Amino acid sequence: QKEVEQDPGPLSVPEGAIVSLNCTYSNSAFQYFMWYRQYSRKGPELLMYTYSSGNKEDGRFTAQVDKSSKYISLFIRDSQPSDSATYLCAMSAGREYNFNKFYFGSGTKLNVKP
Amino acid sequence: DGGITQSPKYLFRKEGQNVTLSCEQNLNHDAMYWYRQDPGQGLRLIYYSQIVNDFQKGDIAEGYSVSREKKESFPLTVTSAQKNPTAFYLCASRGTSGSYEQYFGPGTRLTVT
C-alpha cells in the first residue's frame, strides 16, 4: 500500500465549476500537508500549506485536513481554464519522525473547459 | 527574487557519459532535495540533504551522486551506472525553522541517447 493515494484523473469540469481534489494517507505521523500545481514541463508550484488539521483559505482555493480520517482535500471555486494542470498533494511527519522526507501523491490531472 | 534555480533547462547526453545538474537556492533553507519525475509515476526521491556536508539516499539513489559543500548548492551527478537516466529532474528545498513547506525549482529535462 502506498503511503499517499491520489486519483490520477483526468478530471474534466466546465469553467466556473467547483473542483474537489483529494488524497488519502496511511501514516498517522503526518502533520504537514501541501498542495502543488504543476503545469506541463514546469516545476511544481506550492499552492497551499497546512499544519495539522483544519481548513485554510486563500482566494479561490481552500485546503482541508481531516486527520481522523487521514484525508485531505483541495477545493477550487470558480474554476478557470488557467487552473488546468496536474495537482499534487504532499505531506511530511513531525520532528519526532523522519521530518525531512516528503511523501507525494501521484497527481490528479485537471482540465477546465471554457 | 528568492527562489531555486536549476540549470540547464534541457540537457542532452550520450549514453555512458556522466552529467551534473545544477541546483542553487537563495532562500536560506537548510534542507535540499532531488526528485525524479517520470510520466505516470509521480515524484521519486533520489537524495536529500538536511545540512551542509551531509546527505541521505532516497528511494532511487542507485546511479546518482550528490555533494553539499555549500548551503546554497546541491548538485546532482547522473552517472553512467544509472540504467534509465532520461527523465525530468526536480530540485527542492525546505526551511527548518518556522516554515516547513517545500519549494521546487523549474526542473531540468535530461535526455540520454
Image (cartoon, coloured by chain):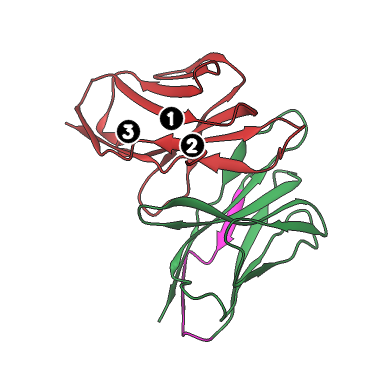
Chain colours: A red, B green
Kindly check if marks 2 and 3 are in contact, taking CB atoms under 8 A apart as contact: no
- Residue at point 80%, 63% (across, down): B69
Residue B61: quarter of image:
bottom right
Distance Cα–Cα, label 2 vs label 1 = 7 Å
Total numbered circles? 3
Q: Answer with mark 1 or mark 3, whichever residue precedes in sequence.
A: 1
Query: Is A90 above or below relative to B55?
Result: above
Query: Is B19 above or below relative to B39?
Result: below
Distance Cα–Cα, label 1 vs label 3 = 18 Å
Q: Is residue B89 within the magenta segment? A: no
Q: Which residues are magenta?
A: B4-16
The amino acid sitting under disc 1 is: Cys
Q: Find disc 1 in the rendering and name its residue.
A: A23
Which-is-in-front pick, marks 1 and 3?
1
The amino acid sitting under disc 2 is: Val
Q: Give left or right: position of B28 versus A110.
A: right
- Residue at point 57%, 79% (across, down): B81
Residue nearer the viewer, B49 or B2: B49
- Residue at point 47%, 49% (across, down): A43
Residue A76 in percent (x, y) is at 35, 22
Residue A1 in percent (x, y) is at 47, 41
In this rendering, do the residues under marks 1 and 3 share a single chain? yes
Q: Which numbered disc covers residue A4? A: 2
Element under disc 3: helix
Q: Find disc 3 in the rendering and name its residue.
A: A83
